[in-house]
Amino acid sequence: MPVLDILDLPSALPAYTPLAGLDIGEKTIGVAVSDLSRTIASPFSLIRKSKFTDDAAALFKLMDDRGATGLVIGLPVNMDGTEGARCQSSRAFARNILRVKDLPIAFWDERLSSAAVNRMLIHEADMTRAKRAEVVDRAAAGYILQGALDRLRMG
């Protein structure tokens, strides 16, 4: 299955199954999962990156545990709209996932997601830098997935 446009994703998924959202960093992969109606995204877990096969196995286990049937992967587009090395890395991750398991995948522009999450954690949650480091990738995955879910609801 090729990577899908975000608006084509629902037609490729079984009804009433969650989506997983990913924030792929250099050292970790933040994972979020939606509810069954695909309305609300919740930060879920953090995968510490090692080698791809281990990362994929950990991701598939998390997805299986929650019944998630598709992925929304954050695409770190530059502020000017161009795609750099981080986008290429996210696209390569998606291609590698599809080589292992055929599942619906779409990308979501994640510009400023980590900045927005950090701002929220600083100002609203009054969280220290050390505590933020532990939750920011999961929270960013939730932010990415929630943006995609909101777009799907708006059509």
Image (tube, rainbow, N blue to C red):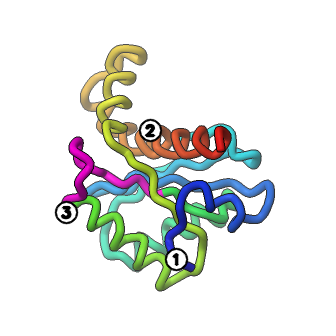
Q: Quadrant of residue 135?
A: top left
Residue for point 44% across, 38% down: 139
Question: Of residues 116 and 25, which is closer to you in this image?
Answer: 116
Q: Secondary structure at mark 3?
A: helix
Q: Position of residue 73 (x, y in %)?
A: 45, 57
Q: Position of residue 17 (x, y in %)?
A: 74, 57
Residue for point 68% across, 68% down: 12
Q: Secondary structure at mark 1?
A: loop
Instruction: Check residue 139 in the rendering and tell me which mark sits there, or answer none.
Output: 2
Residue for point 37% across, 31% down: 117
**Left or right of 32 in this view: 64:** right
**Residue 108 sits above or below residue 96 on the image:** above
Question: Of residues 40 and 75, which is closer to you in this image?
Answer: 75
Circles 1 and 3: CB distance less than 8 Å? no
**Residue 52 sits above or below residue 125 on the image:** below
Q: Inspect the magenta stretch and tell me whether residue 83 lies in it.
A: yes
Disc 3 crowd rating (10 Å Cα; few below 14, some 14-19, many 20+) is few
Specify start and end residues of the magenta stretch as a single range.
73-85
**Left or right of 32 in this view: 91:** left
Amino acid at circle 2? Ala
- N-term-proximal mark, 3 vs 2: 3
Name the residue that disc number 3 marks.
85
- N-term-proximal mark, 1 vs 2: 1
Amino acid at circle 1? Pro
- Distance between the Cα atoms at labels 3 and 2? 23 Å
Question: Of residues 28 and 38, which is closer to you in this image?
Answer: 38
Amino acid at circle 3? Ala
- N-term-proximal mark, 1 vs 3: 1
- Distance between the Cα atoms at labels 1 and 3? 21 Å
